[in-house]
Amino acid sequence: MRLFVLKNYFRAPTAKYNPQTQLLIMKKAIILFITCCLFISNAFSQSSDLDMRYGAEFNPQGTINAFIGQIGNTIFVQSYRKGIILGGVDATTLSQSFENEVSLPLYNGKEVNFKRIDVIEDELIMFCTYYDKKADKNYLFAQRVSQSGKLQGDLITLDEMTAEKKNNRGAFDISIEDDGKRILLFRNPPFEKYGKEKFAFKLLDKNLKEIWSNEELELPYPDRYFSLGDFFIDNNDMLYVTATFDDFRATKESDGRKKAKEEAEARGGSYFSYKIISYNPKDKKVKDYAVELDNNNKIVNLGYNVDVNGDINICGLYGNEDSRGSAIGLFFTKINHESRKTDRLSLKPFDKDWIEDYLGLFLSDKKAAKRVDKGEGIRHLSLDSFINREDGGLVVIGEIYNVYTVCTTDSKGVTRCSTHYVYGTIFVINVTNSGNIDWFATVPKLQHTVNDGGFYSSYAMVNSENSFYFIYNDNIKNYDPKKKDKKLYNMAGVKKSGTTIAKVTADGKVTKELNLKMQSEKMMLRPKVSQDLTKDKMVILAKYGKKERVMEVKLK
C-alpha cells in the first residue's frame, strides 16, 4: 500500500528563509498526512454486513477461469493451460489442495470437444460435443469424472442431430436447474436459409436419465429472421424461450425498403418485435406471447421470469424514435398465461441528469447536455438477474456493458486494432406486486480496459432478505475526500485500486465502503470468476501475475 508522498512540502526554500512560512507549510503537511491516514484507516476498518476471509496464495498450472462447485470440503475450480485442469480448494482453509490435468474422452478414437464441467448431486460431470463427419452428425455427450480428475465409466450420449457440414452443425446448450437436480438440454439444428425456425429440448434428472423430451418443434417464422435467446424452465416443467424477430429485414426483402421503414416508424422506430415462446411437455402445446408497448415507445432490451401463478413478468428498457436505439427508461409488464394478454404496463423514464452523467463519461459536459436535449438515452444496458420477492414483487439487476473495436492505420499502411471492454454503472430496479416500478437505484462505477476481455471488471453479488451487496474493483481516487465532481476515475492497476462493497437497501438507498486488503496483498479480484456456495456464502477469485487466492464472502 502506498501513502501519499509529502516530499514536495519539505522542498528546500529558494527564497529567503521565513519561519512563519515554514511553519505554515509544516501545518499543511500535518493536516494532509492526518487526512490521508483517516482515509486509509477508514478503508480498512469500516464495518460491513459481510464477513470476508482470504486463503493463502498459490500458483496454479494455468489461469483459473471458473469455479465448478463444492463437494464435501472441496471447492472445485477449472483452469486451462494446454488442456483442461481440475483443481481443488480446501473449503476450511481456502488453500489449494490439489491440481490435476483432465484427459478428454475419445469417440471413435478421437478427442471430443470440451464444453464444461459441473457438479451434479455430488458428482463431477463433463459435457462435451463431437462432430462425426462420416455420419454427418453432431453429438452431445456426458462423462463422469472422479474428484481427482480421472475419467470414470463410458461416454454417455445425451443428444444428437443431423448436420451435413461442420461449419453449420447447429448448437447444443445446457442449463443446470434446481442446484443440479435437473439438467435442461437445448438443441438448435443447423441453419436453413429458407427454412422455419426449429428447436428441441430434453430434461434429465440428476442421474442423467430422461424425464421428458420433445420432437423438433417448428415455429411459423423464417429461420433467417428469427433469433432465440435465453431459455427457462419453471417448477411445473413449463419451458420458456425469448425470441427476437427482424421485422425490418423481413419486410424489406418482401415489400422493399420504403415499406419496411414505414412499418418501423409505426412501431416507434423499432426494427424488431419480441416474443416469448412457451412449451408444455404435458400436452405438448406451443404458445407464443407478443411483448409490445404503445406505438410511441419501442423495446430496446428485455428479460423475464415466471411467477407462482404461471404469469410472465417482463422487465426491460424502452426508447423512442428520437433516442435512436438507446434506452430512455424502464418498463414492466405482466402477461397472463391463459389469455396471453398484457395485464398491466408500467413505464419509468430515466432521470435526465443520470443520462447526462452517463454520456459525460465519453463526451464533454456541453456535448452530453446537447445529446440529452435531442432525446438520446443510455446504450448497452445489460439485464443480468431477475429475483422474485416473497410478497410477489420483483427485483431486476443489470449493468452497463459494451465491447467495441477501434482500428487505426499508420502512414505505412499498417492497421492495428484494439478491443475495448467497458463495464459501467450497476442498476437495481424494484417492482411492486401491483406491477409498478417503485424505485430505481444506481451504483456508479467505471471499468474501461483494452485487449484483456474485462479480466478484472464487472461485479459479484450476494443478497440478504433486505439488501443487495455488490463487490467490484474501483479506483481509490473515487474515495478521495477532496473529490467534489461527479466524474469517475477509471479502475486502474493493483496499486491504485481497492475493493468496493456497495449496499443497496430495500428502499433503494445506496452506500459504499472501500476495502484495501487486496491492494495491500498486491492482488485484484476477478468478480466474473465467482460462485454462490450457499444462499449466504460465495467465493471470488483474486489474482495478480501468476499468483491467485480465493476470497470467501459471507453474510453476517
Image: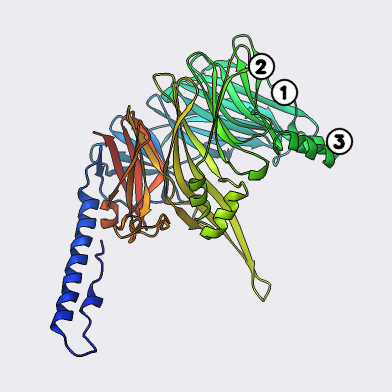
The numbered mark at residue 286 is: 2
Residue 253: percent from left, percent from top: 83, 38
In this picture, is 498 found above or below 310?
below
Color encoding of the figure: rainbow
Identity of the residue furthest to the top in this view: 283
Q: Amino acid at mark 3?
A: Asp
Element type at mark 3: helix
Instruction: Residue 531: tell me if it is visible.
Output: yes
Image position, residue 433 (x, y; %) = 45, 20
- Name the residue at the right extreme: 255
CB under 8 Å between callouts 1 and 2?
yes
- Amino acid, disc 2: Val
Q: Residue at x 34, y 60 (%)?
A: 496
Q: Which mark is residue 255?
A: 3
- Give the SS element for disc 1: strand
Residue 76 lies, in percent from the top left, at: 36, 37
What amino acid is found at the position of numbered circle 1 in the picture? Leu
State the residue position of label 1. Answer: 219
Closer mark to the observer between disc 2 and disc 3: 3
Q: Nearer the viewer, mark 1 or mark 3?
A: 3
Q: Report the Cα–Cα distance between label 1 and label 2.
A: 9 Å
